[in-house]
């Protein structure tokens, strides 16, 4: 390509060069075809997303919040099991509806969680035996909500040992990846961008019209 102009910007760690070449002589690009109308066809089962947020205390007691897009209700519940172990789950099927499952959960160690110079205390909550739960916001008798919590609880206790191994492996991987990136920081590289305007483009017009 024939170079018509070049501009270089030098930065503290690298430089960026923009090279403008002569205009293309290819035919004009045809307009994109009109998209065909899309009609949603019938599906076998309704699909919904359940997105949960859970604050876990001592890997024992979980305060869970979520919104049900089907019933349009906000829910909160206290569950006597560790929701951080449920993060690998991608979907659940508690009843008639297949539901995608998304979870953001974090654990607080109350023994070392000091806030404002005072001993940290778990917010007020119902007393629960291991494996029990209590819905504190939303319809506590909603069958789909009860089925979802029961399904997650049963899955947790059935696969607890495996979920612990998965969580441990994830933590080890993230620690190893962080250590590797710290030992091998990326080095800035110089970049060159070539611009070859198409006939009739605004770049040609800005420089005195098409040639």
Image (tube, grey):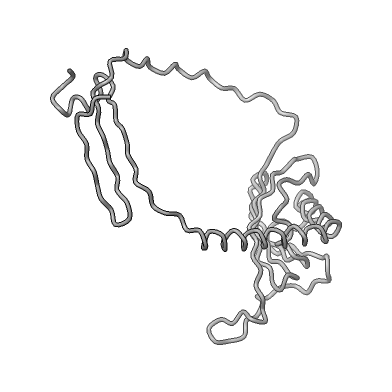
**Percent x, y of residue 66:** 65, 55
Identity of the residue drawn at 75% across and 29% down: 44
The N terminus, quarter of image: top left
Classify 96 as above or below 164.
above
Task: From the viewer's side, name the closer residue of 189 and 105.
Answer: 189
Judge left or right: residue 131 versus residue 102.
Answer: right
Identity of the residue drawn at 59% across and 82% down: 114
**Percent x, y of residue 153:** 81, 58
Splitting the image into 4 quarters, where does residue 163 fall? bottom right
Task: From the viewer's side, name the closer residue of 175 and 206.
Answer: 175
Q: How many marks?
A: 0
Identity of the residue drawn at 66% across and 50% down: 102
Classify 25 as above or below 102.
above
Splitting the image into 4 quarters, where does residue 84 fall? bottom right
The C terminus, quarter of image: top left
Judge left or right: residue 164 versus residue 113.
Answer: right
Judge left or right: residue 100 versus residue 21.
Answer: right
**Percent x, y of residue 34:** 45, 17
**Percent x, y of residue 11:** 28, 53
Identity of the residue drawn at 65% across and 80% down: 121
Outermost residue to the right: 158
Task: From the viewer's side, name the closer residue of 157 and 80.
Answer: 157
Classify 156 as above or below 35.
below
Judge left or right: residue 63 versus residue 19.
Answer: right
Outermost residue to the top: 27
Outermost residue to the left: 208
């Amino acid at each position: 390509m024939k170079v018509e102009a070049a501009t270089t910007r030098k930065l503290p760690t690298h430089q960026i060069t923009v090279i403008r070449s002569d205009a293309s002589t290819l035919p004009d690009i045809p307009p994109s075809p009109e998209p065909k109308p899309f009609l949603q066809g019938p599906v076998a089962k309704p699909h919904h997303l359940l997105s949960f947020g859970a604050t876990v205390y001592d890997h024992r007691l979980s305060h869970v919040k979520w919104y049900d897009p089907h019933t349009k209700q906000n829910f909160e519940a206290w569950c006597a099991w560790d929701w951080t172990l449920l993060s690998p789950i991608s979907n659940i099927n508690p009843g008639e509806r297949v539901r995608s499952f998304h979870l953001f959960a974090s654990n607080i160690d109350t023994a070392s969680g000091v806030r404002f110079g005072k001993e940290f205390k778990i917010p007020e909550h119902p007393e629960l035996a291991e494996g029990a739960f209590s819905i504190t916001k939303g319809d506590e008798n909603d069958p789909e909500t009860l089925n979802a919590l029961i399904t997650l609880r049963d899955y947790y206790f059935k696969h607890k040992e495996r979920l612990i191994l998965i969580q441990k492996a994830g933590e080890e991987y993230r620690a190893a990846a962080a250590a590797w990136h710290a030992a091998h920081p990326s080095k800035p590289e110089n970049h060159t961008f070539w611009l070859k305007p198409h006939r009739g483009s605004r770049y040609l017009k800005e420089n005195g019209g098409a040639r």
